[in-house]
Image (tube, rainbow, N blue to C red):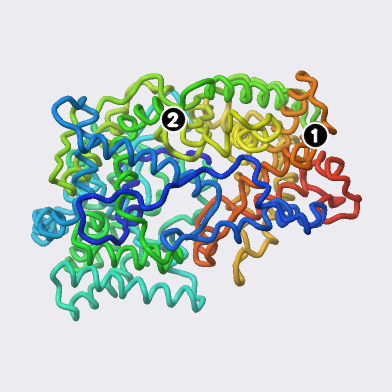
Amino acid sequence: MFFIPKIAAFTSFTGLVFAMTCAAQTVAPPATHYVAPPAFDLSSIDTGADPCNDFYKFACGNFAKNHPIPADQSANDLFYLLYNVNTQALNGIVEKAAAGGASRTPNEQKVGDYYAACIDTKAIESKGLAPIQPLLSEIDNTGKLGLAELSGKLQRIGVGVFFGYGEMQDFKDASKQIAVVDQGGLGLPEKDYYLRDGEKDKTLREQYVAHVTKMLSFGGETPQQALRDAKAILAFETTLAKASMGVAERRIPENIYHLQTMADFEKSLGRLRFTAFLDAIHSPHVEELNVTNPGYMPALIQAIMATDIETLRAYMRYQVLTTFSARLPQRFDDETFDFYSRKLQGQQEQEPRWKRCAGAVDAALGEALGQVYVQQYFAGDAKAKTLEMVGDIEHAMDKDLDQLDWMSPATRVRAKEKLHAVANKIGYPDKWRDYSSLTVSPTDAIGNKQRASAFENDRQLAKIGKPVDKMEWNMTPPTVNAYYDPSMNNINFPAGILQPPFYDPKADDAVNYGHIGAVIGHELTHGFDDEGKKFDATGNLSDWWTPEDTKKFETRTGCVADEYGSFIAVDDIKVNGKLTLGENTADNGGLVLAFMAYMDRAKKQGVDLKKKIDGYTSPQRFYIAYAQNWCENSRDEAIRSQTLTNEHAPDHFRVNGVIVNQPAFGAVFGCKKSAPMVPANACRVW
């Protein structure tokens, strides 16, 4: 994963994340006991498949049969399996906190009460729309001149209307934290959902209108008025989509970095004065800000002026209703799930309430919850072992840089300078976040969500103009993921992913280096992919490459983009080679580095590389473990949505698309040079 840029008050944990069906209840214990799969999963291997012809089929051929997609998920893979295990662990923590008494610590009170309010659907049902009625009334009484202030109020509590606003490190001066204005406000996943004219896209827009109609009618409109408003909302959002950048364009840092003075920015807004918005969202007043898409705000103002106020009010009402749908009566919850999860992702049923409420606590109070999670599930020498692997893989990259025949000495010196400056963050923060100013009630589900969003919004915006905190984390400790931050030049591995099967203290090094070692190599390589290469050792957007080396680099990344662009994901949808280029480069380079690191480690420890365990040599176990990171069973709708919007290729392409470019793979499995997994014209960047 690659963070660029970080925007507060723009990303909200809406009903899209936590929209699931459940009967009215106050207690919802897990019905299933989740267990992590083995680090080396023999049952997934299809011994009838030739690893030299199709390595994914060989390593993962039986995975789908053994791991059917649960009705409450859109896919199944190792990340989902570990997510279920971790969420089960979190549920145990929050239920204990919810049942506690006067002896609870302040954090236990907040964690427990947040969960208790979320899980109490009977109380949520009885309250109806009352908790958000003041917001809906304010929307109905607001004219166009009041939209700036109201937008700030809504964004502060997590309702993403019209555009985004937040803070980020200045791309060209990573020591500064600045304000940023971004495009936003769309109800569909991204701009092209509004503009493509295929039959599936037209059907999806019709379904979106039907969904918005239902939500507005649930909110009090007549069905006829709700339909008129829904069609008008689609037209308004289509105008915003036309002014928005596409997902591939936004991968290029220069495309989303345009510093403007506040005076010049306000000139582009016509009669709108941004001060009212800044005050409402609790932002400090700033003299300059980054306008990621300079054409968007003028187009937004023009669209607002051309749209009747009734449509704009309906648009904001819909945004409020969908944001809080999981804390509203069940009809809102069900309808939001039906469109965003069933129709967009193919998910058949909602997750059980206990699971998403545990996730909601993690989203709102991640470091309070994470502190207990770490104490219980990240003990022993896991952190030390991970740091050892990180050191091995960084050493492998240092050695690899010396061996590159296409990089000049001048660029190599700068590359090593950046590599040696990478900071490594493992498991959890050194200093835990202070939630003492956040009020949490056991009987106020919507109020808790609003206050938690406002707390995080204010925390983020307060950083504008302040020194950068290089120890801050952008993921909570239980998260099953990892990331590289280009402005910080650091790699981050939460405790949540440092669990079996990705890291198993009982597994041999070959398996752990294939699993989490490849993840470490992936994140490290992000610092040198087509985006990361543009940031220097201090995190500044700076061209430190010679022109000749940049040309050679682009030729090599062009090979990767073309390779993945030829893969058909589902139906007639191909993988977008440019959109996924950074992740694919990181996958390919990361596996090379992890293998180099493992071979060095094996040599130091005197490992017999020909000795077989479970029928496979250690190098073979390394590659099988890597492939099993990406064993998947996914619904077509989920693959389609991911391919159109996500910078990551669908899981199964992250195996064969990488293996064909691995210089050591063929010898490890005794493949002939003509075999499909060892092509003559492989791609190699790092």
Nearest the camera: 248 or 318?
A: 318
Relative to 255, does residue 636 appear above or below in the rendering?
A: below
Q: N-terminal of the two: label 1 or label 2?
A: 2
Determine the CA span between mark 1 and mark 2.
45 Å
Coordinates of residue 573 in the picture (x, y in percent) = 60, 67
Q: Considering the image in quadrants, where does the C terminus appear? A: top right
- Asked if residue 248 lies left or right of residue 625, the reply is left
Nearest the camera: 684 or 383?
A: 383
Crowd around label 1: few <14 · some 14–19 · many ≥20 (10 Å): few
Nearest the camera: 337 or 210?
A: 337
> Which residue is denoted by mark 2 in the rendering?
377
Relative to 639, does residue 51 appear above or below in the rendering?
A: above
Dot 1 falls on a residue whose secondary structure is: loop
Q: Amino acid at mark 1?
A: Trp
- Asked if residue 131 lies left or right of residue 555, the reply is left
Dot 2 falls on a residue whose secondary structure is: helix
Coordinates of residue 256 in the picture (x, y in percent) = 46, 44
